[in-house]
Image: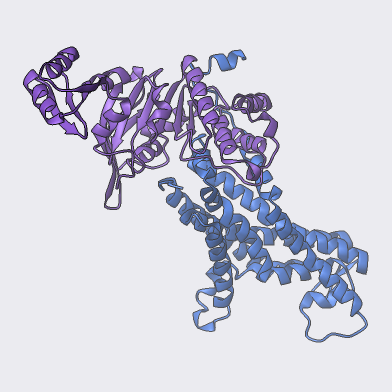
Chain colours: A purple, B blue
Amino acid sequence: MSEPDHRAVSTTALSKRFGHQLAVDGIDLAVPSGAVYGFLGPNGSGKTTTIRMLLGLIAPTSGSLTLLGAPLERLGTSLPEVGALVEGPAFHLYLSGRANLRRLDAADRTADPRSASRRIDEALDRVGLLAAADKRYRAYSLGMRQRLAIAAALLTPKRLLVLDEPTNGLDPQGTREVRHLVSSLADDGTTVLVSSHLLSEVEQVCTHVGVMHVGHLVAQGPVASIRAGSAPVARIEVDRPDAAAGIMAELGVTEVRTVHGAALGELGPVPPEKVVAACVHAGLAVTGFRVERPSLEDTFVALTGEGFDVSG
Amino acid sequence: MSAAEATAGALPRRRTVSTRFFRSELRLVFGRRRNQIGLAVLAAVPILISIAVKTSVSRPQQGAPDFFDSITQNGLFLALAALTIELALFLPIAVSAIAGDAVAGEANTGTLRYLLTVPVDRTRLLVVKYAAIVVGAVAAAFVVSLTGIVMGLILFGGGDVVLLSGSTAGFWDGLLRVLGATVYIGIGLSALGAVGLFFSTLTEQPIGAMIGTVIFSTASYIADTVPQISWLHPYLIIHNWMAYGDLLRDPVSWSQMGDGLWVALAYAAVFWLLAWARFGRKDVTS
């Protein structure tokens, strides 16, 4: 915990055991203040368990954490400045959206009752739900429910937003709106911790990412540095891939492999044009050549050793 | 944006003592259709009794409960007759419905996790929840009693009250005694509400907590009739519930009601603390 002041969220060897299963295994999470931190990983990798520990809903089996500078024992002092969306929206079915927000605001001892109506309307307006504010929650679509949950997290000014799968159930338009909302909140200086199993949804807005895999934090850092960790891959399409692979290996290309009609390899310091020239010189019929920097998603598949499937 | 909000990020926000959350809880309990119907059912019983007694008034009855004989003499007794009948099952069910729902209901809908991250301190949540249960229990008793009083006075009239001990008290004195009996019953039901609150922290299924609480009171009634365990009887939650009849004696006999209040207080304290011990460190995964 060096520089605790510059971390909105910090954990040390945080672990949680449910029965025999170690859901979270000694993670050191570091969310810098002002960051938009993408908390990624397959379903069941321990993201939600971690978030529940950060919010004081479940107690860690071991390890420590600080939330906006407050340790676990004093989470109550920092939680008023944390807006949370945990594992989907949950409201009273038979109350309207507005009445549900009023109830949450009433429960907040730090909220000023005199400004409650105005703040509730502003939060509803911000998520585009003002027109449906007096409908019963029961009648809301999944997307509207998700928006209401985000509105609930914005009732009072927050320094940290913890959004667990905020785009679940939203249509593409809603997903875009959530991204814009996250960006605009971040522009105001709010730190955002956003979890997702869909990388593409958060990739554009994140400044930092952390990747969970079966309870471990397998990678963490600024997006650029995570991406830099993966080498560009050259793909050459030829009539004789085996011959091309041999040429590439001679040139010093690593991880060379062939697929149907093409040879691939990590270029490293080898200039790409040399690969093409060598292949042409050897009399191979080159029909295509591409150098791909792996997407963040490819990097994560490499890190987690699998796609974004459920991990046991 | 006000100055207070502008500085909110830099300074710890002001914490105030407020009844907002408690009032919100009351709105939730009494605004709920199911609870409103429950109260209507409770109110229906004295109405039905009053009509039944009125239409059969010419036929002499045998073996009717104490208060029933007196209803035609004074309408106030309708309230006591209705309370006696409903105390066995209807009132315990009403309290169980509110208490069983208190924590398990929020866990079931998932709203519990959002209350806790507001944050609502867990002890404060149990205090507010129990306070609302107590209001609900007392309100349930008063719905029965006030409906009984109104219907009784309309159909049978008021006037002086002939007490169970044979002496006569004035109408207002009698009214006060009936209201006192209602408060006493409300306190007994509040103790059952603490049991329900504890059960409500054990499960995410409110129905389970409700049924458990009803079984608790019904099993206590049954145990109270088994002579082999008479040593246990004074400690049963329902043992002294019927003692409110002592208020209708002259002079008022306080001893059993005094025991009843102590037993209720003990149940309320023990089960609230059990709920606190259970819920205080419980992992909320709902």
In the rendering, at what x and y percent does residue A119 appear?
63, 25
Which residue does the image show at 71% across and 68% down from the upper left? B86
In the rendering, at what x and y percent does residue A15 appear?
28, 39
Which residue does the image show at 29% across and 22% down from the upper left? A221
| Residue A70 shows in this picture | no
Nearer to me, A306 or A158: A306
| Side of A247 relative to B39 (left or right) | left
On screen, residue B105 above or below A16: below
Nearer to me, A98 or B246: A98
Which residue does the image show at 58% across and 72% down from the upper left? B218
| Residue A95 shows in this picture | yes
Q: Residue A309's quadrant in the figure? A: top left
In the rendering, at what x and y percent does residue A50 appear?
35, 37
Q: Residue A63's quadrant in the figure? A: top left
Which residue does the image show at 61% across and 38% down from the upper left? B21
| Side of B47 relative to A162 (left or right) | right
On screen, residue B121 above or below B207: above
Which residue is situated farthest in the left direction here? A250
Nearer to me, B238 or A83: A83
For the N terminus of chain A, the quadrant is top left
In the rendering, at what x and y percent does residue B236 appear?
55, 69
Total count of labels: 0
| Side of B117 relative to A210 (left or right) | right
| Side of B146 relative to B235 (left or right) | right
